[in-house]
Amino acid sequence: MAPKKPLKLPLAAAEVDRSAHLRTDEKYLTSAWPKAEVLIFANERFSATSNQLRFQKGSELGSYQPETDYFLGVKDGEAYFVRHLTIDQAINIELKTLREVGAFLPSRDIGLAVHAQGLANWHQKHPMCSQCGGKTVAASGGSIRKCLVDNSEHYPRTDGAIIVLVKDDKDRILLGRQKVWPKNRFSTFAGFVEPGESFEQCVKREVLEEAGVELTDINYLGSQPWPFPASLMIAFEAITNTPELARADGEEIEEIRWFSRQDMKAAITDKSLILPLEISVARQMIKAWYGERADSDLKGNESWR
Ligand SMILES: [Zn+2]
């Protein structure tokens, strides 16, 4: 076997130091704001021009608002924040999703965007305290929320999800199509880790449930944030010795297909296969398996997801 190249995962980029020690320093946050580079986020979208995120100086946006301005970190002496607006407040701003612009962004901006989006999504969904039902407010530069009634602290959550490239002994790969997806849109298998479960157990369970095959040789490939709304995708590859047993569960997965490289090239050419987005782990695992010609052979037919 050829030596493994590490998986290139587009959203696993980070160039800005999160500078956690500055989050509680309100004097710093207030004084850094006017010169800071600020992203605008509203309803799963960023302020953007063409296919790039639009940064504005804090001073252009008025004063620092601890309730909606979250500190993202520092790079080369420059502070970064995101301002989290409601849909109504952002009505006159050109906004784009990370799915739309993700493939065009430099690493620094990808790292900022996944951080900002994960954080903002969490704030939006946790206005109340899970202990007492009281009102919570953003604190520590937006890195946590605090309950105004019992003073309890609440931390952003990240949901662990596995994603797995299933292969057989002929080096074919198994892809599935979810009921809710458009016709011909196939991807690798994925699912959320349950309480008390290891990643490896989750990989085995999900694929057995959804595609009916048992797995061996489970290998870790890498991970990347997937803030739609709050996942961390943990990527694996695995082998099944019983490819003939593969069948869709008929509930979550409606259809499954085995692909050799030749099958895949033909399916892309005749448009009977739509692959997941370039920024997804699934797409990168499929490309790594396909090999050097992936970029030219698998171009086009990219789904919106
Ligand atoms: Zn409370």
Image (cartoon, rainbow, N blue to C red):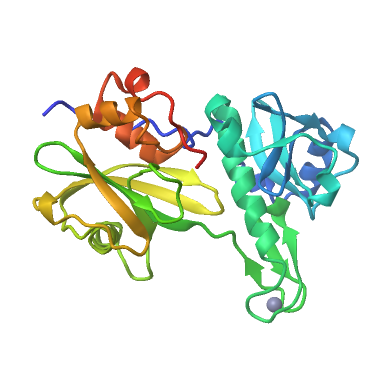
Residue found at x 68% / y 82%: 132
Residue 158 visible at all: yes
In which quadrant of the rendered view does residue 149 lie? bottom right
Placement of 232 over or under 93, stated as above or below: below
Placement of 289 over or under 44, stated as above or below: above
- Foreground of the two, 226 or 176: 176
In which quadrant of the rendered view does residue 270 lie? top left
Left of 46 or right of it: where is 262? left
Query: Residue 41 appears at what percent x and percent y?
Result: 72, 43
Left of 109 or right of it: where is 166? left
Placement of 2 over or under 244, stated as above or below: above
Quadrant where the image shows the N terminus: top left
Q: In the current view of this chain or complex, which residue is farthest to the front?
A: 270
- Foreground of the two, 96 or 78: 96
Query: Residue 209 appears at what percent x and percent y?
Result: 27, 64
How many numbered dots are placed on residues in this image?
0
Query: Residue 202 appears at what percent x and percent y?
Result: 29, 61
Residue found at x 48% / y 53%: 231
Residue found at x 31% / y 34%: 286
Q: Classify the position of ligand 1 by quadrant: top left, top right, bottom left or bottom right.
A: bottom right
Left of 111 or right of it: where is 44? right
Residue 6 visible at all: no
Query: Residue 274 appears at what percent x and percent y?
Result: 40, 36
Q: In the current view of this chain or complex, which residue is farthest to the bottom?
A: 132
Residue found at x 16% / y 54%: 215
